[in-house]
Image (cartoon, rainbow, N blue to C red):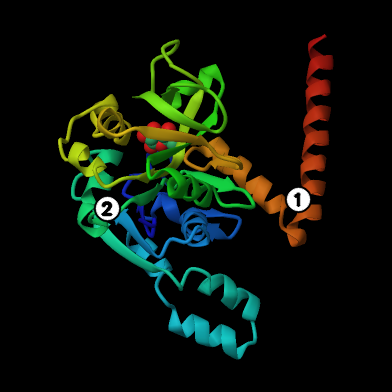
Amino acid sequence: MQVKKAIIPAAGLGTRFLPATKAMPKEMLPIVDKPTIQYIVEEAIASGIEDIIIVTGKGKRAIEDHFDHAFELEDTLTKKGKFDILDSVLKTSNVEIHYIRQKQPLGLGHAIWSARKFIGDEPFAVLLGDDIVENGEPCLAQLINQYNQTAKSIIGVQKVSDEETQRYGIIDPKLESGKLMEVNDLVEKPSRGMSPSNYAIMGRYILNPEIFNFLGEHKLGTGGEIQLTDAIQQLNKHQSVYAYEFEGKRFDVGEKFGFIETTIEFALKRPELREKLLDFLKKKITEEELERSLLSNKLK
Ligand code: G1P
């Protein structure tokens, strides 16, 4: 069966970005001039997804407005001949986007479970909004390609350093041979020194619908939340789950430093900003170095 539906959970409170997220969803924070969630939706479309369900919560209306047609704006841009801007506004209009509210903030697993009626009995994709992946062949398309060959649930992974393993769901591969690995076990945010490997789950999944049997048990895991990783661990006991080490650079826009890094990297890719930004960064570094050497001379 083909993977045509995707779930994007977007119900999180965005506390790491307060006060910006007090009245605005964190998914609407822009990287240069595009909301983070639009990068995710564009990846899904480029991977052949036809229906997207966004799981929202309180205060997330701006996401619905963003993906809606804005007739006045489109009309004005057409009349003014601003077709490139119009293109950027219309980029996500050829996909069906649906919305559902997560009634209680019970965790990622619960958010996915909330969308079960929309998915029905089909394999589906999950894309987490905190992870933007840049690659010629979209990350999700790589996973779908693997799914088409195996019909097994596939988790997108990349290697992280020992210190970083505590921030992610980590898989324990049966054999580390090649990019596609059968999963032996999974653990959500292992404690320091307890990680079974360095393969971290990077916010992209293809899941068989049987996952809903385990999400429906509503078992609380790490952080007192219903964890998707725990449900996949259960699923793995009944049907084998695979991990795929995908190609591409992954950006973490879910925390401040990662957000700033991503903004700089993406701005440097824009021809109209690149030179100006490089000049600015060089100037900043020179100023900082000067200040540091003055300070260390004073201390001598
Ligand atoms: C979630 C998942 C975790 C995954 C991570 C990737 O955690 O639970 O398994 O590794 O996303 O970004 P969160 O970062 O939402 O706490």
Q: Which amino acid type is marked by label 2?
A: Gly
Q: Quadrant of the C terminus?
A: top right
Residue 172 image position (x, y, % from top left): 42, 21
Task: Indicate the secondary structure of the residue bearing disc 1.
Answer: helix
Nearest the eye: 267 or 129: 129
> At 47% from the left edge and 57% from the top edge, which residue is drawn?
44
Q: Quadrant of ligand 1?
A: top left
Residue 298 falls in image quadrant: top right
> At 17% from the left edge and 35% from the top edge, which residue is drawn?
218
> At 43% from the left edge and 46% from the top edge, which residue is drawn?
147
Residue 285 falls in image quadrant: top right
In the orientation shown, which residue stands out farthest toward the front? 149
Which circle, 1 or 2, is nearer the viewer? 2
Residue 19 image position (x, y, % from top left): 41, 45
Residue 277: mark: 1
The residue identified by callout 2 is: 57
Residue 157 image position (x, y, % from top left): 49, 34
Count of number-bearing discs: 2
